[in-house]
Amino acid sequence: MRAFSPRRILAVARKESLHVIRDARSLGMAIGLPVMMLLLFGYALTLDVDKAPMAIWDQSETSVSRELISRFEGSRYFSTCERALNYRELENAIDTGRALMALIIPRDFASRIGSGRTASVQLIVDGSDSNTATIAMGYAFVAVQNYSQDVVLNENRRIGGRTVVPPLELRPRVWFNADMESRNFIIPGLIAVIMMVSAALLTALTVAREWERGTMEQLISTPVKGPELICGKLLPYLAIGLLDLALTVLMGKFLFHVPMRGSGLLLVAVSFIFLMGTLSMGMLISIMARNQLLASQMTLMTTFLPAFLLSGFMFAISNMPAALQVVTYAVPARYFVTLLKGIYLKGIGLEILGADAALLGVFGVVMFVLANVKFKKKLS
């Protein structure tokens, strides 16, 4: 008898496929979970600051102060939510969350500008969300700086002096994400997180379910070998994982309008490797747990949290503590996120991403081997 029979693998795969098709809950989780997660995170998770609500107290009430206010109201980054008459109204607007920031223009603003002196305006920002506050302050600084430059240029023209040319001019050019849309880099990373969680959950329950239902003893008594059983159980879920990948990629393109500049074939290839490793990881957890509840809990702890926090999906790895940066090398989603962002945003290939693809392949092989070794131990 051959030690490795494709016929037995296909028989196990057919059995598992029938179980998935007949179990509406498993099939719904397999297809509906990635779609639901992409919709929820895709719309709810954003780092863009648009139409930040601003309260304004214009004590000057002159054409000069209104010109400054128009720089904020004409920007896509701010929206005036309230015109205050005192500090108490400003404080109430920020405390209740109606305003993210407050702009206060002093009474002598116009006179100081008109006489060529330095004028100060106060900006009060709600710092409870430090990331949003930092971005909003940056936009406000640019608006005030542009206004200040225009005042200087207009004054020079008025008095007939020569135009002052700044000695240094910065001309920024953004590559790969010209519009600076956070969605363009969140969606590719989100696909990696979703694929890791959903794929591992699919297989994390399969062997544990066999033990709970008492059908594992029947499988052990058949001529099916351990590697054949593992491969047979992985095949249907690999097909489902590739279907989920296609759905998430299509949703990213047509629903969120995220461009993909790289090779679609390379995307499928690295996703296949990642899915094999993640499915094998779920199988390993299922073999170790022998209980569906415990297997699902272990899967969420070992997939979602590391993939979300330590993969570079949301937080730059370079900003993490040195010890934590070392830990991220053990998180396979780190390499998949790098690959997806490189393919989606930069359009680069294996000449640059080869190391990440190789490490992802190592992860897949190690997980598959461990699942087979651990399953043999359970059979003995």
Image (spheres, rainbow, N blue to C red):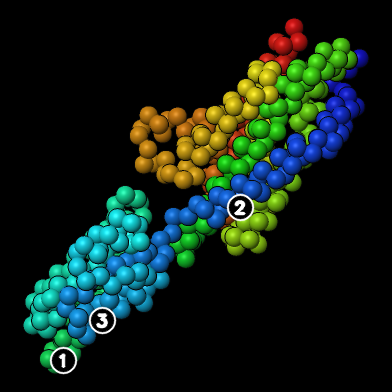
Please name the residue that numbered disc 3 is placed on: 67
The kind of secondary structure element at disc 1 is: helix
The kind of secondary structure element at disc 3 is: helix
The kind of secondary structure element at disc 2 is: helix
Amino acid at the residue labelled 3: Glu
Q: In the shown orientation, is residue 7 left or right of residue 146?
A: right
Mark 3 burial class by Cα count in 10 Å: few <14, some 14-19, many 20+: few
Q: Upstream in the sequence, badge 1 or badge 2?
A: 2
Q: Nearer the viewer, mark 1 or mark 3?
A: 3
Amino acid at the residue labelled 2: Leu
Q: How many labels were placed on the picture?
A: 3
Q: Give the spatial CA distance, label 1 vs label 2.
A: 55 Å
Please provide percent x and percent y for residue 298.
59, 25
Camera sees residue 350? no
Please name the residue that numbered disc 2 is placed on: 39
Please name the residue that numbered disc 1 is placed on: 158
